[in-house]
Image: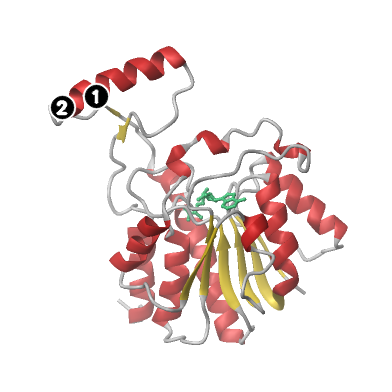
Amino acid sequence: MHQKPEQLYLDLMKKTLSFTLWPEPPLPITTFYIRSPVKRFLVSAISKVLDKRKLLLVQKRDFSQSQRIEGRVWPVYADTMIGLKRLDNLQYCVETVLREGVEGHLIETGAWRGGACIFMRAVLAAYGIANRKVFVADSFEGLPKPDDRKYPADKGDKHHIHTYLAVSKEDVENNFRKYGLLDDQVVFLKGWFKDTLPNAPIEKLSILRLDGDMYGSTMESLEYLYPKLSNGGFCIIDDYALRGCQMAVDDYRSKHQINSEMKEIDWTGRYWRKE
Ligand SMILES: C[S@@+](CC[C@H](N)C(=O)[O-])C[C@H]1O[C@@H](n2cnc3c(N)ncnc32)[C@H](O)[C@@H]1O
């Protein structure tokens, strides 16, 4: 065993935050929005009856370990859905900016249960870094309805109907607390990105992690925050497999003539280093 204590701690954090140490449990059937009104009504009625008997209707899901490692599933208990490969990438990026002294704070736009942000705070803690903050930007009420006049690429986007993606700020704070990582180095930016990001109290960033799924959410994060990213800082894209996100990234890069090589993390994660 040659690993240093900080590496052992961060490895355990990644496995715990992604819940990959344990098998994926069955999914309570009411977790996701059910499209068919008849099915929705039946499930709701049956669930109410079962609930009185302290029983729960669940759906068995046999995801492979590789699907979970690659963050291809919406998990039941995990505090992050980004999977181990994207957590490894996040660790690499944060460790690189710390080692090379690239100035600036760390932010994720789109935090859900907070897992990726908790992990960034854990990396700072592991290396005793006290002069950088982790910004956690989220509505804490899920995704916005698409504004298709402003962002035609989001027309028909259905992310906003998923209550599963709405996690309250209190729940996210509690998640940080569970790991002993809630302190004044964690700053919450609560609200829609279009309202919180333009005047966010951030001068410089070294890590800009985007996980807002939609064209508008991705574009707003880039427009308001990319200019604050230091040279040598990392821009990480979680949702390049989603058409809207991909279009926003490609549009922004071409509009601002960003030619830094965009590297692949996994089936959906991409990142580049600002030059
Ligand atoms: C896929 S989840 C993020 C997953 C998370 N990074 C993780 O580690 O598991 C997307 C999140 O983005 C937030 N979000 C998306 N667009 C937003 C917007 N325009 N303003 C505020 N929050 C937004 C949602 O509330 C949701 O929590």
Tell me the kind of residue under disc 2.
Answer: Lys
Q: Residues within 10 Å of mark 2 (few under 14, many from 20)?
A: few
- Asked whether mark 2 lies closer than 8 Å to ligand 1, one says no
Residue identifier under label 2: 52
> Is residue 192 depicted above or below 122 in this figure?
above
Using residue 209 as the reference point, say whether residue 39 is left or right of it. Answer: left
- What residue sits 78% from the left and 51% below the top? 250
Q: Which residue is most to the left?
A: 53
Residue 263 visible in this rendered orientation of the protein: no
Q: Quadrant of the N terminus?
A: bottom left
Tell me the kind of residue under disc 1.
Answer: Lys
> Is residue 43 depicted above or below 125 in this figure?
above
In the rendered image, residue 164, in percent from the top left (x then y), is placed at 43, 40
Residue identifier under label 1: 48
Cβ atoms under marks 2 and 1 closer than 8 Å: yes
- What residue sits 41% from the left and 52% below the top? 168
Using residue 90 as the reference point, say whether residue 155 is left or right of it. Answer: right
In the rendered image, residue 227, in percent from the top left (x then y), is placed at 75, 71
> Is residue 61 depicted above or below 196 in this figure?
above
